[in-house]
Image: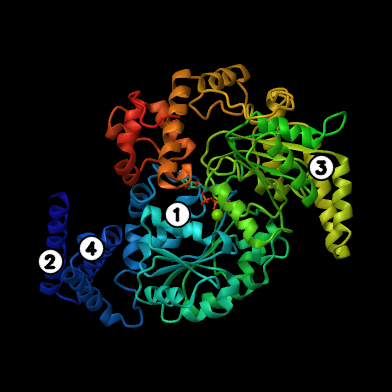
Amino acid sequence: MEHDRARRALEAEVEDLAGAWRLGDPADPALRATCAERLAALRARWRARPDLFTGASVERLREVARALGEPARSQPSLPLGPAAPSRLAPEAAREVLRSVFGHADFRPGQEAIVSAVLAGRDCLGVMPTGAGKSLTYQIPARLLGGTTLVVSPLIALMKDQVDAMARVGLRAAFLNSSLAPDERRERVRALRRGELELVYAAPEGLEASVGEALSGVRLSLIAVDEAHCISHWGHDFRPAYRNLAGLRERFGAPVLALTATATPEVTRDIVRQLGMSDPLLVRGSFLRRNLRIHARKKGDGLTGQDAVLRLVQARRDRSGIVYGLTRRSVEATAAALRSHRIRAEAYHAGMEADARARVQDAFQSGVVDVVVATVAFGMGIDKPDIRYVVHRDLPRSIEAYYQEIGRAGRDGAPSDCVLLYSWADVMSWDRMLDEGEPDVAAWQRGQVRAMFRVAEGEGCRHAALVGHFGEDALDCGDACDRCTGEDVLASAPAVARRRGRVRPGRGERAARRGRRGGPATEGEAGGEDPRAAELFEALRAWRSGVARARGVPAFVVFSDATLAGIAAARPRDRDELSEVSGVGPRKLAEHAEGVLAVVRGQKIFDQ
Ligand SMILES: Nc1ncnc2c1ncn2[C@@H]1O[C@H](COP(=O)(O)OP(=O)(O)OP(=O)(O)O)[C@@H](O)[C@H]1O
Ligand SMILES: [Mg+2]
Ligand SMILES: [Zn+2]
């Protein structure tokens, strides 16, 4: 019924637009502008709900689009191009943020980037890990018409990214060498028919066949993700990024470069190498207050392995990453955790590519709780509910450290970052670095020492870290061990050898949380309120049931932050539920009933 009504309403709208165009003066700029605007809106609608459009309506819209495009052949993008969207920009972007992504507000920096991009300006966004850079090209991809090309070095993650886009209803695909020939042909066809809003490709692919596939495609934006890979000064140099400047010239599309690496050398390199013209630089704050930073020096009977065991044990069932320095230590730590019945896997560059992909998938989907990894792991991992990152050893630089801890708490909920370090780690790095080029090695040795100094430093750790990126910040007061005086290991009890899995019941866990009052879970569930904490646990249990039934990771159902929001708000009906951040129309349609039942105290899935 409702569907029919919506369909008829749309048909009427299409007829109305076609009529307005037919009856008006095609040379009248005002008419052109309003028709273009209405066309863009209908097109967005078509993308969201193609089922509402009949073949005839689509044909009508095509006619209008063609007619609008005719006198301006040199600008084939006129009807849907920059002219119309830039007038719509701020409101339309917000609307997409809410209706497609289900977020209530932009995070700092996002809106400035989106507006610049919609206005056709080159833009460089420097924002910390987890700040929400992806949205800054995903929203324009919906609004600009044509196709947004996303250049990313993360081939292993492209499938995840595309799946995530499909879940919110954006049409995306990736092109890379892993595709079978007919699959690839089908995608290229879809691309050329203008059916894809986003296409992901690796820079290496763009040099070759993917570059060819793009010919004849209307690219409206080139988004260069992880743009620091273009620079020698970054930590992940990928030479193929250097060819992207040519791509920009070829398509004349604006470039949006995104990175979490904040050093001035890297920023300058990106702008120059990509040939960006008068780019808008948007630099987000690197302060991440939901990360609770602790550091402890190893030695005096405290070993890395032991500390890791204690910290992870105290955070059972939560997702976490443990970073270690060598492949050997990473393997050993993972094995030690497994012997304590913790679902942990190792990850390092010495493993076969598909073994690594398996670990990554298992982690992403929640089959594995802890990944013990070398620096090889993490770039681009978008698992929002990582609750802690432990560094078993000193990281190689402040930038690397900041990127690595940044993988925790992407959903904005409190998360712990524990750094274990010693001077012996510095010596180990020196030995490893000796193998490289002398100049580079000397520079890297300096980086390791700077990291050591930060670990040893007095004063607020947040202030020290963002200070390193040129930002002034007041002491956090409550989110680092220097400010609170808290000893993170004191709240993680020593580990006894035990056999068999001891899984505390719900009551016991809540009690423990109360006793510890410590960093692992407080705040996730709405702070001090014990009722909210209990509801949060019930919602988590409901969520794992749903996730299991659907074969998706838990965070796909709802993030921890959203569950905490629901637990705090205790919505009584759909309207109140829809007010909670992270509950978009899609999620509301799918899950309102389940969530409201849990809030009302009915249990649908048993724990
Ligand atoms: N406006 C917003 N409101 C709430 N959540 C948001 C918002 N924007 C993004 N997010 C969430 O933040 C998380 C991180 O986003 P994203 O993957 O884009 O980070 P990033 O900046 O690209 O980080 P990285 O440098 O690690 O790639 C995602 O889970 C996303 O859903
Ligand atoms: Mg990203
Ligand atoms: Zn502090």
Question: Which dot, 4 or 1, sits closer to the camera?
Answer: 1
Cβ(mark 4) to ligand 1 < 8 Å?
A: no
Residue 434 in the image: x percent, y percent?
A: 89, 59
Q: Is residue 75 left or right of residue 496?
A: left
Q: CA distance from mark 3 to mark 4?
A: 58 Å
- Give the label, 2 or 4, closer to the camera: 2
Q: Residue at 73% of width from left, 25% of height from top?
A: 487
SS of the residue under disc 2 = helix
First in sequence, mark 4 or 1: give its number.
4
In front: label 3 or label 4: 3
The quarter of the picture where residue 442 lies is bottom right
Q: Is residue 25 above or below residue 378?
A: below
Asked which quadrant contains residue 23, the reply is bottom left
In the depicted structure, whether residue 77 falls above or below residue 319: below
Which residue, given by chain and number where applicable, does mark 3 sit on? 452
- Along the line of sight, which residue is nearer the eye, 283 or 568? 568
**Label disc, if present, on residue 164 of the rendered structure:** 1
Q: Earlier in the sequence, mark 2 or mark 3?
A: 2
Q: Provide the residue designation for mark 2.
A: 15
Marks 3 and 1, the one that precedes in the sequence = 1
Disc 4 designates what residue?
A: 38
* Structural distance between the alpha carbons of marks 3 and 1: 38 Å
Q: Is mark 3 within 8 Å of ligand 3?
A: no
Quarter of the render that holds ligand 2: bottom right
Q: Amino acid at mark 2?
A: Glu
590 left or right, relative to 343: left
Picture quadrant where residue 69 is located: bottom left
Q: Do the residues bearing badges 3 and 4 touch, measured as CB atoms within 8 Å?
A: no
Tell me the amino acid under the disc marked 4: Arg
| Residue in view at x 15 percent, y 49 percent | 2
* Dot 4 crowding, Cα within 10 Å, few <14, some 14–19, many 20+: some
